[in-house]
Every structure is written in C-alpha cells, then in structure tokens.
Image: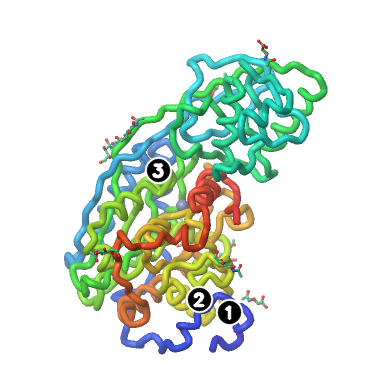
Amino acid sequence: MFGKFSTVLLCVSAALAQEVQLDAKLGPKQAVEIERLNATIASLAQIATENGGNRAFGLPGYNASVDFILKSIENFDDDHAFEVWTQSFVGLFNQITVHNLSISETESYVPQGLIYSPSTPVGGVTAELAIVPGDATPCNSEELLATGANVTGKILLIERGSCPDGTTFAGKVKTAKGAGAISAIIYNNQDAFISGGTLTAPNPDYIPAGLLQRSDGLSLRERVLAGEVLNVHYEQIQNIENRTTVNVFAETKAGNKENVIMLGAHLDSVSAGAGINDDGSGVSLILELLRTLDAKNVKNQVRFAWWGAEENGLLGSKHYTETLPAEDVDNLLAYLNFDMVGRGYYGVFDGDGSTFNLTGPPGSDVIEGIFTKWFHAQGINTTAAAMTGGSDYYHFMEDLDKPIGGLHTGTAFEQDPCYHQACDDFDNVNVTQLYINTQAAQHTLLKLIERGPEIIPKGPSNLTSTVLLGKKVGVEWTHLIEDRHHSGCAVAL
Ligand SMILES: *[C@@H]1O[C@H](CO)[C@@H](O)[C@H](O)[C@H]1NC(C)=O
Ligand SMILES: *[C@@H]1O[C@H](CO)[C@@H](O)[C@H](O)[C@H]1NC(C)=O
Ligand SMILES: *[C@@H]1O[C@H](CO)[C@@H](O)[C@H](O)[C@H]1NC(C)=O
Ligand SMILES: *[C@@H]1O[C@H](CO)[C@@H](O)[C@H](O)[C@H]1NC(C)=O
Ligand SMILES: *[C@@H]1O[C@H](CO)[C@@H](O)[C@H](O)[C@H]1NC(C)=O
Ligand SMILES: *[C@@H]1O[C@H](CO)[C@@H](O)[C@H](O)[C@H]1NC(C)=O
Ligand SMILES: *[C@@H]1O[C@H](CO)[C@@H](O)[C@H](O)[C@H]1NC(C)=O
Ligand SMILES: *[C@@H]1O[C@H](CO)[C@@H](O)[C@H](O)[C@H]1NC(C)=O
Ligand SMILES: CC(=O)N[C@H]1CO[C@H](CO)[C@@H](O)[C@@H]1O
Ligand SMILES: [Zn+2]
C-alpha cells in the first residue's frame, strides 16, 4: 500500500487499510508558509530576549507570549470565525535565585536545580562531604546506615538512581534526610549532561538538594575515598509559591460541536532558556494551522490550545481536562499534540503501540496512520515516538481516554543538543523541518475535519467508568514524566 516505503511501515495501523484517499476538494483556505513559521519563532525568541531569557511559567516572558498569541489570532481572524478565550489557573511556581557549591575559594561547582527542594539558610551551610560507602545504592535511610556510614550533620554526596517509589531523585533526598544529613548533592547516573530535575512536590521529608554532573560527582567521591576531608559550602535559595497563569484557546464557531478536534502546544518554556524548539516550534505550528484554516466552512469544530505551565508538570492541560464539563468531554473527538517539532527525527506518536507497546486509546492508531502515510508519500521516513506521558496529551489519554496523536522530533542529544538549555534559541530550530511537520499536521487536521467521525471510534466518555490507561498498560506514567520533563536526559524507555 505504501509502495517503496513498505519496509518502514511498522507503525501503520490495520484500520488504515480500509481508508480511502483524502478528498481532493478538501483544500485549506491558504497554504502553510515557511516565512510565517519563521516569523513566529523569531517573535518568541525576541520575547525571551526582552524578558530575561525565558518564557517560563510565572515570569513576564510567559505573559508576553500570551499577548503575542492573542494578538496574532486577532490579526489572522479577520472574518471573526474564531471564539477566543483564556482560562486561568494557579500553579506552584519555583525559582532558584542562588545556587552555589564550593570547597574553597578556588574550587567551586555549578550545581543544577531540583525543583521543590527546600532552601538552605541564607548564607548557606558548611559541612563535611560524606559519601555512600562501597557500591551500595540505598533508597532508604536504613539501607544507608546499614553500610556503616555516619552522615549526621554532613552533606551527603549520593548517586542518582531508581527507587521503589518510582523516583530517581526524591528517594535519594529522603534517604539522606532520614540518615541525618543536612543537605544532599545528587550526581547523575549517566554521563549525559543533566540540566535539572524535579522532586515533584514540596515535602517535609526533603532537605536542601542539588545536582552535579556525573564526572564532578565521581571525582569528589574519589577524593573522599582517598581520605581527603572536604568541607563543602552549599547555598541554595529557592522561591516556591503559588502563581496564577493561563491557557489560551481559539475554536471555530463553525463545525459540528459534537465532534471537536483539538490541537495543542505548550506556550511556556523552561526557565533555563527561550524554549524555541521546546515548544516555540509547536506553538508556531498550530498558529499557522489556525491562520490557514478555512474556519467558516469546517465540517467539524476545531479547537486550538496553547497550554500554560507544561514544564512544571503539565499543569495547564491537567487543569483543563480536570475541569472540562462531562458534555464537552463527550463531544471531544481527538486530541493532537505538538511539543518539539523543529529538529531531530520525523517522530509520529506510536498510537497503535506497534513499536513501544504503549498503545493509545482506540483511534490513536488511525491518527498515526494518517500522519505516517503522508510522510511516506513525501519520501520521508518516520520514527515512532513513544507515548510515555511526557507532554500535554497525557491527561487526554489517561483521564479522558481520548484518541490522541501528534508529532515529536525527539529530546535526546542526537535530536536536540539544546534541550531545556539556554541555547534552545531561534537557531536551534530547523525551519524546513518545522515547515514539513506543519504541512503534515495540516493534512491530518483536514482529514479529521472531513472524515474524523467516520474513521475514529468515538466512545462515550463516562468519566466515572473510564479505565485509566496507565493501569491498562501497567506503566508508571508519573515516573516517566519526571524523566522526560525535568532530568534534561533522553526519555527513559
Ligand atoms: C528566517 O528568519 C531569519 C531571520 O529572522 C532569516 O535569516 C531566514 O532567512 C528566514 N528563513 C526563512 C526560511 O524564511
Ligand atoms: C501574568 O499574568 C497572570 C495571569 O493573568 C497575572 O496574575 C500576573 O500578575 C502576570 N504577571 C506579570 C509579571 O505581569
Ligand atoms: C555520628 O557522628 C556524630 C558526630 O560526628 C556523633 O555524634 C554520632 O554519635 C555518630 N553516630 C553514630 C551512630 O555513630
Ligand atoms: C498553593 O496552593 C495550594 C492549594 O490552595 C496549597 O495547598 C499550598 O499550600 C499552596 N502552596 C504554597 C507554597 O503557598
Ligand atoms: C528510509 O529508510 C530506509 C530503510 O531504513 C532507507 O533505505 C532509506 O534510505 C531511507 N530513506 C530516507 C529518505 O531517508
Ligand atoms: C533541516 O531539515 C531538512 C528537512 O528535513 C533537512 O533536509 C536538512 O538537512 C535539515 N538541516 C539541518 C541543518 O539539519
Ligand atoms: C457512568 O458509568 C457508571 C458506571 O458504569 C454508571 O453508573 C453511570 O450511570 C454512568 N454515567 C453516565 C452519565 O453515563
Ligand atoms: C504489551 O503490554 C501488555 C500490557 O502491559 C503486555 O501484556 C504484553 O505482554 C506486552 N506485549 C509485548 C509484545 O511486550
Ligand atoms: C560566591 C558565588 O559563587 N556566588 C554565586 C551564587 O550563585 C548565584 C546564582 O546561582 C551567582 O549569581 C553567584 O555569583
Ligand atoms: Zn515541551
């Protein structure tokens, strides 16, 4: 069916075999323009530059991004075909203002932050550096103390690693506190650069904690093993407070309201950088779909979402799905997500689970097939993207059990060496790839608008009877979210 590309069709669904060709009359109002995509990511990069280098939740660069999206929609929607609104919600904001680790005036390190770590006293603490003896990898204080270590009153240097509670950082911080340490310095368990991590939520069982790269952690550990006494000065001031932010929505006034097709991209960045691939690329992709849509003549309703506070734990999409009235849930046909679509491989969500065995709700396979077929027809090979739950589609699939799909070009170094870093700027996006992905998304959107209700099973959404997908496939989604979102490493598969 896919001719010369038949060798790479691992992820095409059986359901697609019965599909007919996209109807030729189904043109968009306008064609996708590469200059528009380029201009949007340039504007977002400029917004970051003017607002302290980022567009993160709780900071002025986010609000400026919201204003930019609202203004852009207003400019494009000259025939008032869209209803536009914002939805505000409160999320837990965090910002590390001071983070220093030094051993002497000449020897200092740049620790990376752990979101929701408590602060040290202002001015910091000074204490001896303790290590975990031998090759123990304790996940509770009993295991640590059983090694004979006495870390009371000390700063514990401990390796990152999986703990039974599903975390790779929090379990280690609790272990250190339980054994009497006053701070924990976790070093990475992989050589890959680590740009940060999260402790998921504030917890009285934590002590002030930060991260070191593996090489730094190992060399300090060697020195302690060799008998050197290292008196470490550690200071971390982290501001944790509730702040109000918004999601932005635009939906067509036209179209069948019982078959709503939703598309989303997160509008916030990490605080470390401008977030132009992550996710200025997705932001510009859906904005261009809005601009080019023949919104007055859509057969089924289309709703665009620019999510807030994604990088802090999918907060905007979580708030939306949690508060969406049951009737609106029922009317939702499918959700498409575009988070990182500007450089890397041509990743299509593995809706049918054929590659990763993390199958999406029924219909996700059909969406995957539409995307994949389009790419293959252009002579472009696709890579299956695992639905590990690390972006805004998670609550649509887990809580609402809706068919999902979308594109994702990858977070590993080979795909995006600037992932979650300051260099994720304008130059970090391959505009040609963004252009191709936007065309793929336009094709899929038009197909769903025209034929979605026929080709996607629309099960009744009864929130009380929804079987959680996480339970269905036996995956610990929370753990995967931590790894994808905050570790700065490749997705843990
Ligand atoms: C994108 O914009 C930059 C400058 O803002 C320009 O140098 C480049 O040629 C543009 N690329 C495309 C494909 O329009
Ligand atoms: C950003 O917008 C939010 C929500 O509208 C508002 O509460 C907050 O004060 C704004 N922040 C800034 C820095 O303007
Ligand atoms: C650990 O060391 C501290 C002081 O360094 C000492 O007061 C305490 O008794 C020691 N604990 C054990 C269990 O040896
Ligand atoms: C944030 O708000 C939640 C819910 O109202 C509350 O439980 C929590 O204590 C607040 N956190 C902070 C740091 O103020
Ligand atoms: C696609 O993948 C096939 C099989 O791995 C390979 O032979 C072919 O060169 C690839 N095509 C492109 C355009 O990368
Ligand atoms: C950008 O993407 C295009 C289309 O996939 C590709 O041909 C080109 O090699 C990419 N450029 C870079 C610098 O990777
Ligand atoms: C939802 O499912 C539950 C359990 O199957 C049932 O008791 C309830 O009536 C259903 N609610 C609606 C609105 O269909
Ligand atoms: C796929 O996952 C299901 C559910 O976890 C499991 O029962 C099944 O054995 C897995 N299949 C493969 C091929 O791993
Ligand atoms: C003395 C010292 O190294 N101070 C640094 C502490 O950390 C903040 C931000 O993390 C830096 O700005 C200071 O220079
Ligand atoms: Zn993202």
The percent position of residue 28, horizontal first and vertical second, equals 32, 77
Horizontal side of residue 315 vs 134, given as left or right: left
Secondary structure state at the residue bearing disc 2: helix
**Image height check: is 282 above or below 380?**
above
Q: How many residues crowd mark 2 within 10 Å: few (<14), some (14–19), many (20+)? A: many
Residue situated in front as seen by the camera: 470 or 274:
470
Chain-order first, disc 3 or disc 2: 3
| Residue, far right | 226
Q: How many residues crowd mark 1 within 10 Å: few (<14), some (14–19), many (20+)? A: some
* Type of the residue with mark 1: Leu
Q: Which residue is mark 1?
A: 9
Q: Which residue is mark 2?
A: 372
The residue positioned 25% from the left and 60% from the top of the image is 250
Chain-order first, disc 3 or disc 1: 1
Horizontal side of residue 384 vs 79, given as left or right: right
Q: Which residue is mark 3?
A: 55
* Type of the residue with mark 2: Thr
The percent position of residue 459, horizontal first and vertical second, equals 32, 72
Number of the label disc, if any, that sits on residue 363: none
Q: Is residue 65 visible?
A: yes
* Type of the residue with mark 3: Arg
The residue positioned 40% from the left and 75% from the top of the image is 444
Secondary structure state at the residue bearing disc 3: loop
